[in-house]
């Protein structure tokens, strides 16, 4: 695996952990249509990959 790939995978894993913390203790009804969750997901993934929105 290329070093750059390892970094990207680590960033994606970290983003998933952050999202998991955000949705912890919420029901699917709580999350359905939750715009904040959508923002957090997209922001977290883009930020972790070194991009900007």
Image: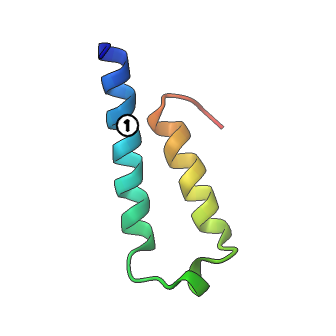
Residue farthest to the top, as pictured? 2
Disc 1 is placed on an element classified as: helix
Display coloring = rainbow
Identify the residue shown where x is 58% and y is 77%: 31
Identify which residue is drawn at 61% across, 67% down.
Answer: 36
Q: Which residue is mark 1?
A: 11
Left or right of 10 on screen, residue 33 = right
Left or right position of 30 against 9:
right
Rendered view: 38 above or below 25: above
Give the x, y percent position of residue 7. Answer: 33, 26
Please give the name of the residue rendered at 55% of the width and 82% of the height, measured from the top-left corner: 28
Eyeballing the image, is 33 above or below 1?
below
In terms of depth relative to the viewer, which is nearer, 14 or 52? 14
State which quadrant residue 21 falls in: bottom left
Q: Which quarter of the image is occupied by the C terminus?
A: top right
- Residue situated furthest front in the rendering: 1
Residue 23, x across and y down, in percent: 45, 72
Q: Residues within 10 Å of mark 1 (few under 14, many from 20)?
A: some
> Residue 13 location, x and y as percent?
35, 44
Q: Residue drawn 29% across and 15% down?
A: 3
Tell me: residue 35, above or below residue 10: below
Which quadrant is home to the N terminus? top left
Quadrant of res 9: top left
Determine which quarter of the picture holds residue 37.
Answer: bottom right
**11 or 50, which lies in front?**
11
């Amino acid at each position: 695996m290329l070093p750059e790939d390892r970094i990207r995978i680590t960033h994606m894993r970290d983003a998933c952990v952050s999202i998991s913390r955000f949705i912890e203790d919420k029901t699917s009804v709580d999350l359905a249509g939750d715009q904040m969750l959508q923002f957090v997901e997209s922001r977290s993934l883009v930020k972790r990959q070194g991009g900007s929105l």
